[in-house]
Image: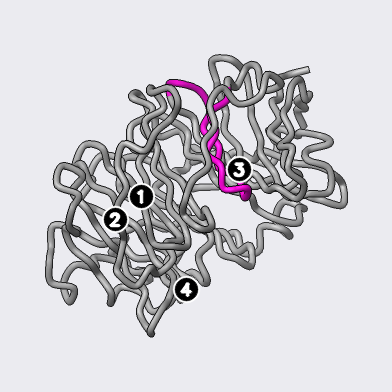
Amino acid sequence: MYQLTAVDGYKYSKPDTYVLEILPVAAGLAAIASDQTLSLFDPTRLNAGPLKQIRTDHGNLTCARVYDPVESIVCTAGENGTVSIWDFRTNPIKAAMQIKGNTDQVPILSLACSNPSHTLAAGTELANHQASILLWDLRSPSSLKISYSEIHSDDITELTFHPTTPNLLLSGSTDGLLSISDTLITDEDDLVLTTFNHGSVHHAGFLNQGTELYAASHDEKFAVYDMSDETIDKGAAVLDVGDIREAVGCQYLANVVPKLGGQGAVVGVGSQDQEMFQLVHLAKGGDGQWGLDRESVVALPGAHGQELVRSFVFYDEQQLVVTAGEDGGVRSWRPT
């Protein structure tokens, strides 16, 4: 096991603040927190505090995604059904655009952005027996491009566009289903290409520029699927880890971060009792089979104390890992 040491950090001043997500952009490290703020940090100087910070007006801030990493444009959404698009190049930060998701103010739980296709997708909470995926073309955001309400029957907790085929949208829900839809198709009866029954979806995403994807459930079930699988067992996982807590000896899965270049992904897992967070490499072996590499685990001892780590990012060139947690802290880590 390889260990990193905490070298820097910042703690939000408001008590009981959770840092919900951190996102790397060219201007720095964007962070959203339960105090309803969107902040920008220098990841190499966290202790200097936020370079920029603004209070959002979503009622309760639920999610954020990067629309354009180079131009440092980030989207946020929340419980009042609005989506804001922020330009970190401006000082102070200001909303370049705000979109109302629906007239009923149904909470938005998930976002996905596709800069190449100018598309923003939002997934809603179940309300009035309906959970919707809303799509906008940001070149004409005053009205919805399309809305899908039959793909899922419960809260839509995860959305992500395919990295090279942006008309393909992955969606995950607490109804247990993971779906791949072709957003070029307007008829809801025909747009779902593939569905996997994984269990209540917490996190999911594409692993590379091809056909494989990962999924993690709210009860910590982890698996890899291949949407091109045409075998007799179509829909079965190509890697079924089962309960990842038992597989790697942890108490929870925080998130999964795909590596650039199609080299697998890093799975972040933690143990509050041991005050430990670990990075486990998910990769393909020489036989072409996916697996968790338990021999090259990277440990972050101390983590965020006995609080959960919510999000992590890594900067390979700087040999830097940044974590964010429910202790209200953002911490950076380097090799000892």
Dots 4 and 3: beta carbons under 8 Å?
A: no
* Mark 2 vs mark 1, CA separation in Å: 9 Å
Q: Is residue 27 above or below residue 218?
A: above
* Mark 1 vs mark 3, CA separation in Å: 17 Å
Residue under numbered circle 2: 169
Residue under numbered circle 3: 311
Camera-nearest label, 4 or 1: 1
Q: Residues within 10 Å of mark 4 (few under 14, many from 20)?
A: many
Sequence-first tag of 1 and 3: 1
Asked which secondary structure carries label 4, the reply is: loop
* Span highlighted in magenta in the image: 26-41
Residue under numbered circle 4: 176
Is 7 left or right of 226, judged from the image as shown? right
Q: Residue furthest right?
A: 273
Asked which secondary structure carries label 1, the reply is: strand
Q: Main secondary structure of the magenta part?
A: strand
Residue under numbered circle 1: 112
Residue 128 image position (x, y, % from top left) = 38, 83
Report the amino acid beneath label 1: Ala
